[in-house]
Amino acid sequence: QVQLVESGGGLVQPGGSLRLSCAASGSILSINAMGWYRQAPGKQRELVARITRGGITSYSDSVTGRFTISRDNANKNTMYLQMNSLKPEDTAVYYCNLLMAGGSNFWGQGTQVTVSS
């Protein structure tokens, strides 16, 4: 079993920054990719950013240039999302996702990010 724990969410003013963390633990054999998704009220969950085992990153158009996904150099099971220049439309529950090489998919419990003045 794999557990994902997100942290770092909260309330921030427009233009501010937050850093989300995701710590993965358990029976992690081989990670294919890790990613951040978000779901706003009344909307579908959407991919925000993704990082592959080889370190290749990709972003949704709405966050490109403002968000940065990374993995901890010392512990590859820990992932971050640096969010800068936050906008009210970034308000959502952010979920950590882990895709194993065998195709198994795991989710964290989510962390709330609210951007408001």
Image (spheres, rainbow, N blue to C red):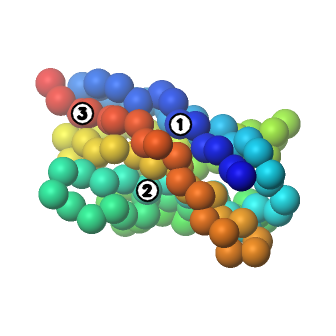
Q: CA distance from mark 1 to mark 2?
A: 12 Å
Tell me, yes or no, whether the two marked residues, 1 and 2, touch with CB atoms within 8 Å.
no
Question: Which circle's residue, 3 or 2, is located before the other in the chain?
Answer: 2
Would you say residue 75 is visible in this rendering? yes
Query: Pointer 3: what residue?
Result: 115
Residue appearing at x 69%, y 50% in the figure = 2
Judge by depth and name the residue closer to the eye, 98 or 67: 98
Judge by depth and name the residue closer to the eye, 83 or 28: 28
Determine the image quadrant of residue 23: top right
Q: CA distance from mark 3 to mark 2?
A: 17 Å
**Secondary structure of residue under mark 2:** strand
**Secondary structure of residue under mark 3:** strand
Amino acid at dot 2 = Tyr
Residue appearing at x 48%, y 62% in the figure = 59
Query: Pointer 1: what residue?
Result: 6
Query: Pointer 2: what residue?
Result: 37
Tell me, yes or no, whether the two marked residues, 1 and 3, touch with CB atoms within 8 Å.
no
Q: Give the x, y percent position of residue 39.
A: 31, 54
Amino acid at dot 3 = Val
How many circles with numbers are drawn on the protein? 3
Question: Which circle's residue, 1 or 2, is located before the other in the chain?
Answer: 1
Question: Which circle's residue, 1 or 3, is located before the other in the chain?
Answer: 1
Determine the image quadrant of residue 14: top left
Amino acid at dot 1 = Glu
